[in-house]
Amino acid sequence: MKKTIGISVLSISAMMAIAGCGGSGSGGEGQVKLTLMSTATTKADQDIFKEIVKDFEKENPDIDIEDSYPSDGYEDLARVKMAANDLPDLFDTHGWATSRYSEYTEDLSSMDWASRLDPAMEPILTDEDGKLHAYPINQALDGVSYNKTLLDEYGIEVPATFDEFIAALEEVKEKSNGEVVPLWLGGADKSQFGQYFDQFATPLLITDEENSYEEELLDGSFDWSNYTYLAEKLKEMNDKELLNKDVLTAQVTMGPELLAQNKVAFVMLNGSVGREVTGLNPDVQMGTMPVPPIHEGDSPSWIGGERHTLAVANNSEYKEEAKQFIEYIAQPEVAKKFAEGTSLPDALTDVEADNYFAEFYKQYEGTQIQPYFDRLYLPSGMWDPMGATGQELVAGTLTPEQVSDKMSQEYTRLRSE
């Protein structure tokens, strides 16, 4: 069903980004200028994007790519551009390829790489009519990342349940005499709080058979008081000083540096964070774990699906040149470089990438992979209030119950649009 897209108020960063990723146009004399907008937020992810863009431009001097990374302002900016039908030539569908962006994307199913697409990604990116909406640069296996060097030093076992996770945070605080941040969030970017709620909502509300609300979430009858537990636990962690004191002003880009200095134990950062930290300090090894179960008897799960993608805007002046860039990054050697640069599994069947977290993925082989909670169970637009309510909770302007009330209101409102 086609939905009306409302234009929300842009953050300052998003407004500034508008000029940087508008429609396509001509670059220098005889040169095509493509615009590209990505959700890459970490420095390592952005660096590998920029490097590959430059490599492409060297091989194709007649094409110039103006790439931008609006970070926290991506969703607001994308909504404005959809409303104006002015999306960049190449843009990230960030989990909404077949729903939110479907009417704005070019069909890529006839491209050469489509036959090499990992079968697990096909239903995520292809609609019922067979239209392939985007090229997946990598796949997500999100969980909780941790400073393995610190945990080994303190003799702390990797937690297997949510209760053990909270206990491990308390143990880090105790054994470090408060010198190490147990759980660090770059909360100046509300998506860090969104990551917490989104990932832990799966074991709270979906994977345990006796506490599964899949049907209610999908049909609109969900009682949001069942969500309050996550807000209560976040408040508890903040009150017990298990979060960084500057949680509301800390920038995501600070995380790897602090991990490399052994000042942080656990983070809600995934993918390239491991390679980035060890690159800063070879003596620090990072680890990753699936999202631990909350209910007794349940199992852990990875939160997965598409991570970074590129779609071609169907009203682009330069569709062929945009597809040319996608064909370039779909070459096995470039796809391998992208996967290793972002420390995430590739999405093509003929690519063998050396992933930083490979030993941990192998350790948890067979662990169930669940889709992102908001992408499957919530209406489009819920990611923003999910993160914003976390900021307000930690700031003390919302109680845990009010967090659930606000989520309920937004859920009802957005379902009706």
Image (spheres, rainbow, N blue to C red):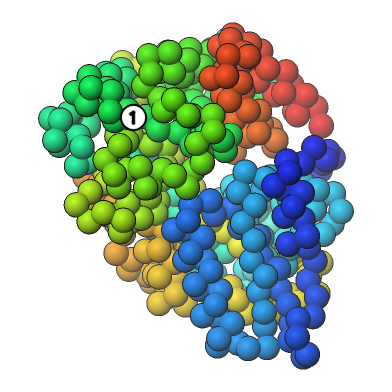
Residue beneath disc 1 = 181
Q: Could you say where residue 362 lies in the image, as x and y percent from the top left?
A: 24, 49
Compared to residue 414, the image places residue 34 above or below, namely: below
In the displayed orientation, state which residue is furthest to the bottom: 30
At horizontal 32% and vertical 20% (from top left) the residue drawn is 166
- Visible in this render: residue 129? yes
Q: Could you say where residue 155 lies in the image, as x and y percent from the top left?
A: 12, 30
Label 1 Cα crowd, 10 Å radius (few <14 / some 14-19 / many 20+): many
At horizontal 70% and vertical 24% (from top left) the residue drawn is 411
Image-quadrant location for residue 375: top right
Image-quadrant location for residue 341: bottom left
Q: Quadrant of the C terminus?
A: top right
What secondary structure is marked by label 1?
strand
Q: Quadrant of the N terminus?
A: top right
How many circles with numbers are drawn on the protein?
1
Compared to residue 137, the image places residue 237 above or below, namely: above
Q: Could you say where residue 273 lies in the image, as x and y percent from the top left?
A: 38, 50
Q: Could you say where residue 35 lies in the image, as x and y percent from the top left?
A: 71, 68
Question: Is 12 left, or right, of 156 in this rendering?
Answer: right
At horizontal 59% and vertical 82% (from top left) the residue drawn is 57
Q: Given the image, on which type of amino acid does mark 1 rest?
A: Val
At horizontal 66% and vertical 13% (from top left) the residue drawn is 405
